């Protein structure tokens, strides 16, 4: 297989090498024989794992880091959203005349020569990409892949495979998805987000149309018909002569008759083992067939994501029966309804703790709905207790009402202060603007500005058997183990 690159990848330096996206690409580069160096603001498990694999990594950003291997790198990779322009390593690269590229540019180079399977959407990219990889691996296709989270089963976020396909997330947040040339493109949903970059909703929607136009000759666009904007994208793409395959529930398929229905999802019973699914599949060139499998991960959104994975896997040569078996064995992704443990005895006996990356109102709604379905299926009267950390001041201001409505799906909620990430605090803006829009009558609400006090505050709301969820894209990721430990203390 040809993997020739227009960029010299013999010696690559990655700024922010410990990040979810960067660390995966570094792993692939090492597997392909590149000399890899990098830097990060702190030591971490991904950094140590890369060092064991042969990367040379410095903690802290300094100009001299570009000389870690004794040879000048042939290219420097950065994430423009996370790395400031005055980063000393970027300045050193400019002074030395070393090319600087974005992470998405590197991924595009690594995918050259492969059948490119790109998964895009406002929500669900990581879960759907992970399902696709798991299904394809079970079908014996051994794809290369780069995803934003770690597959729970595989324990990794990237792999240099022996197969013909390369599966990756296509990130729309800075329009970097337009760097790719997909053979198979999946769009799970489209809902305005990242308006700090796009400025207008129209510009955000347009980037998905532009993405569809980048399909290679003979390629296919797969869209979720249960999402109005994704379905409309499919309809417009059909009119432009693009091969479009739709997936969704029976009602959604009927509502969008101009998009060929390739997978109709009929959700069955929700039991202790998961959700029983029946999917009618009709892929061009195949005889229509029906597959059945039980999905371990709860939620209608996950059932739909699995249908997208089924179609992507089939279009790249996988057997439907083997792909379905792979989906049945899918154990989830780190930080996507990730199970951390249960309380075996004592005051909080039976309570279970999960963690999720949800940081947009639609994601929060999907996760809390899935949690609600889970406790109702169990029929033991358990409740849903959520701890939410808003991510970014701009997103919190834009979606305060929607966050309040989404969080009201829980029985009890602890709201932490905003995690600003790359943004500076905004005077007068705190998590209280979300609480103002919550259902004060039916949901117990606690505002907890002290992060260290969060486990105790959460414990004050928990009852035996409850499902406890920590949610957000910031430091809340560290909280679930502490909450579980606090509950086990009784």
Image (cartoon, rainbow, N blue to C red):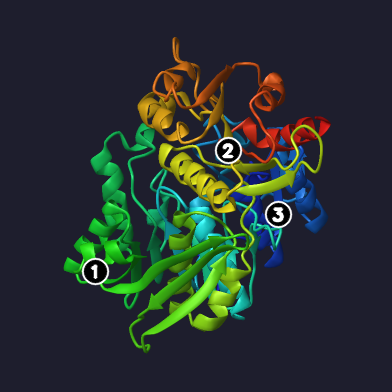
Circle on res. 383: 2
Q: Residue 41: x percent and y percent? A: 69, 33
Which residue is depicted at the point 36% across and 27% down?
401
Q: Circle 3 sits in a helix, a strand or a loop, which is it?
A: strand
Mark 3 against mark 2, which lies toward the viewer?
Answer: 2
Q: Residue 470: x percent and y percent? A: 61, 36
In primary-sequence order, the first of circles 2 and 1 is 1
In the foreground, 227 or 486: 486
Residue 110 in view of the camera: no
Residue 16 left/right relative to 436: right
What residue is pinned by disc 1?
259
Residue count near mark 1 (Cα–Cα under 10 Å), binned few <14, some 14–19, many ≥20: many
Mark 2 against mark 1, which lies toward the viewer?
Answer: 2
Q: Residue 284's image quarter?
A: bottom left
Q: CA distance from mark 1 to mark 3?
A: 45 Å
In primary-sequence order, the first of circles 1 and 3 is 3
In the foreground, 342 or 89: 342
Which quadrant is home to the C terminus?
A: top right
């Amino acid at each position: 297989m040809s993997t020739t690159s227009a960029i010299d990848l013999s010696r690559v330096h990655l700024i922010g090498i410990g990040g979810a996206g960067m660390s995966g690409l570094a792993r692939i580069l090492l597997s392909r024989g590149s000399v890899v160096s990098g830097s990060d603001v702190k030591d971490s498990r991904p950094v140590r794992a890369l060092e064991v694999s042969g990367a040379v990594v410095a903690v802290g950003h300094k100009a001299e880091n570009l000389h870690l291997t004794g040879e000048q790198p042939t290219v420097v990779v950065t994430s423009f959203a996370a790395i400031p322009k005055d980063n000393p390593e970027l300045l050193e690269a400019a002074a030395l005349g070393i090319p600087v590229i974005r992470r998405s540019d590197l991924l595009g180079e690594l995918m050259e020569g492969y059948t490119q399977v790109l998964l895009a959407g406002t929500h669900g990219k990581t879960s759907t990409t992970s399902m696709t990889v798991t299904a394809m691996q079970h079908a014996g296709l051994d794809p290369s892949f780069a995803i934003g989270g770690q597959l729970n089963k595989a324990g990794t976020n990237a792999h240099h495979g022996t197969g013909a396909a390369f599966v990756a997330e296509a990130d729309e947040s800075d329009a970097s998805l337009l760097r790719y040339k997909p053979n198979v493109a999946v769009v799970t949903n489209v809902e305005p987000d990242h308006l700090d970059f796009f400025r207008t909703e129209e510009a955000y929607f347009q980037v998905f149309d532009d993405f569809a136009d980048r399909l290679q000759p003979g390629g296919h666009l797969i869209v979720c018909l249960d999402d109005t904007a994704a379905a409309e994208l499919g309809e417009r793409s059909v009119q432009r002569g693009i091969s479009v395959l739709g997936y969704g529930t029976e009602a959604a398929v009927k509502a969008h008759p101009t998009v060929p229905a390739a997978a109709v999802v009929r959700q069955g019973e929700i039991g202790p083992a998961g959700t029983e699914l029946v999917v009618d599949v009709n892929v061009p060139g195949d005889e229509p067939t029906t597959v059945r499998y039980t999905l371990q991960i709860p939620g209608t959104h996950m059932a739909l994501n699995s249908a997208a994975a089924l179609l992507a896997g089939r279009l790249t040569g996988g057997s439907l029966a083997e792909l379905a078996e792979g989906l049945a064995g899918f154990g989830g992704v780190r930080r996507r309804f990730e199970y951390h443990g249960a309380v075996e005895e004592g005051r909080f006996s039976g309570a279970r703790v999960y963690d999720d990356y949800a940081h947009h109102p639609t994601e929060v709604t999907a996760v809390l709905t899935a949690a609600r379905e889970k406790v109702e299926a169990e029929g033991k009267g358990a409740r849903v207790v959520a701890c939410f950390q808003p991510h970014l001041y701009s997103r919190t201001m834009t979606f305060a009402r929607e966050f309040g409505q989404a969080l009201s799906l829980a029985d009890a909620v602890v709201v932490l202060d905003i995690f600003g990430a790359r943004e500076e605090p905004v005077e007068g803006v705190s998590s209280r603007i979300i609480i103002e829009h919550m259902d004060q009558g039916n949901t117990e609400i606690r505002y907890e500005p002290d992060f260290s006090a969060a486990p105790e505050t959460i414990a004050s709301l928990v009852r035996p058997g409850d499902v406890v969820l920590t949610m957000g894209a910031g430091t809340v990721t560290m909280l679930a183990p502490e909450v579980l430990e606090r509950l086990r203390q009784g």
